[in-house]
Image: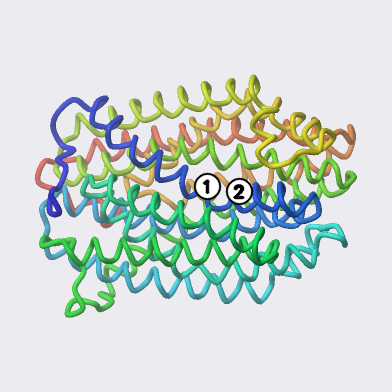
Amino acid sequence: MKNRIQDMTQGRLSKQILFFSLPLILTNVLQVLFNMSDIAVVGRFSGPVALGAVGSTSILVTLFTGFLIGVGNAINVLVARSVGSHEDQEVREFVHTAGILSLFIGILVAALGISFSRALLELLGTKPELIDGATLYLRIYLLGMPALSVFNFGNAVLSAVGDTKRPLVFLSIAGVINVVLNLFFVIVCRLDVAGVAIASIISQYLSAGLVLLALHAREDACALRRAFLRITRGKALRILSLGIPSGMQNAIFAIANLFIQAGVNTFDATIVEGNSAATNADALIYDVMAAFYTACATFMGQNFGAGKKERILRSYFISLAYSFGIGAVMGLLLVAFGRQFLALFTTDAAVAEAGMARLTVMGFSYAVSAFMDCTIAAARGLGKSLVPTVIVILGSCVFRVIWVYTVFAYFGTITSLYLLYVFSWSITSVAEILYFAACYRKQMQTFRQDTPRLWQHA
């Protein structure tokens, strides 16, 4: 069992992608619950000020963690392709190089984030009554970035060989401990925002340790061994060339959202707190949908490596259908049961009402993001990451900034601010799909059964 590698190059794709994605969905949801439980506990037991303080950091947390997740996605694609082409030595070099790079990148992200935490929060226009608590929470939380980076690395490697169940088990264990520690530190120790941040990083280091043990226990090319721990220059360059743009794709959304948060901060504290509570739904739904994006890139990667031309495009369309469907269903459920969802984070009726303003708009919009994100994952599966990043910068970052200073500035309503999400997703989706179609046609024209390595130079 510990050396089982799922063959994604044959069999019924719709069934394979679904069963591959289900553990990933639960894994992603548990990761969301780390931060969500922080907000829920402080909101229920420490009051609206603590809720606003932790919630005010959500975009910055997404900025840093999104970058690390993007790097992990690149590792997943590269390992999957090597596995598909049965290049054991290449797999081994990728695994050990990626492990070292992931640790270094996590440390770097933590150092930069901690150094500029307060400045970034001030740039966002965080309310004076919230900024001290927000800074404390963010600085403590960022100490867990090395652990998160290592876990994402291990999760990427295991997912590349079809093992999506053990990361789920590890996060289940860490998630339970996180909730218990949240309650202990906040209710018993009365540490408020510091307590939930400490609980989160303890859980992150636990999950990272468990995933490293799982990799060490393997006996195949994915096994993590001290004797092989070295950076292979060629593999490092390929990880960084695909991983940095991939990480930036995720981070760019958070950068653009900084301007949105600044717009939210122009309203009163009730709307800020309601927005903080409602944004928990974003992470929850995005990460459920993201499981199918990971499946898309992984299945495309293995089939590309194995030379299975006919299965590459089908992997994209099936993953897109799943992600769109789950986004639509979850969004509608959120509109219908939004007040019950918000009750997890606040008991203040005015804050809940403000949160519903966001949930109502977003609930009908989430599914649209599947066309953008799944296509980006598909392009990554073909080895393309730089151009999709540029498209995201223009379509989701530049466009959103322009919207904030034009449409939102003109209407001045919170609804006009929230509507920019669906409009930016729509225009970015069109551009990403056109680019992916062109890349796919070009790739298939040069595709040969005996050229699984061509992607290295793409």
Q: Which residue is identified by label 2?
A: 253
Query: Which of these two is toward me, 192 or 124?
Result: 192
Residue at left offset 74%, top offset 51%:
51
Which x, y percent locates residue 171?
Answer: 39, 52
Point 14% across, 40% down: residue = 7
Colour scheme of the picture: rainbow
Where residue 359 appears, as percent x and y from the top left, is 69, 30
Instruction: State left or right for residue 165 relative to residue 106.
Output: left
Q: In this view, does 428 lie above or below 133?
A: above
Whether residue 115 is situated above or below residue 308 in the rendered picture: below
Q: Is residue 201 visible?
A: yes
Residue 407 visible to the viewer: no
Q: What residue type is labelled 2?
A: Phe
Residue position marked by numbered label 1 in the rendering: 32
- SS class of the residue under badge 1? helix
**Cα distance in 3D space between marks 2 and 1:** 17 Å
Q: Where is residue 354 in the image (x, y as percent from the top left)?
A: 80, 34
The image quadrant of residue 290 is top left
Q: Type of residue at label 1? A: Val
Residue 59, position in %: x, y?
A: 66, 53
Judged from the image, the secondary structure of the residue bearing numbered disc 2 is: helix
Q: Which of 224 and 300 is in front in this view?
A: 224
Q: Which of pointers 2 and 1 lies earlier in the amino acid sequence?
A: 1
Asked if 200 appears above or below 452 in the picture, the reply is below
Q: Which of marks 2 and 1 is in front?
A: 1
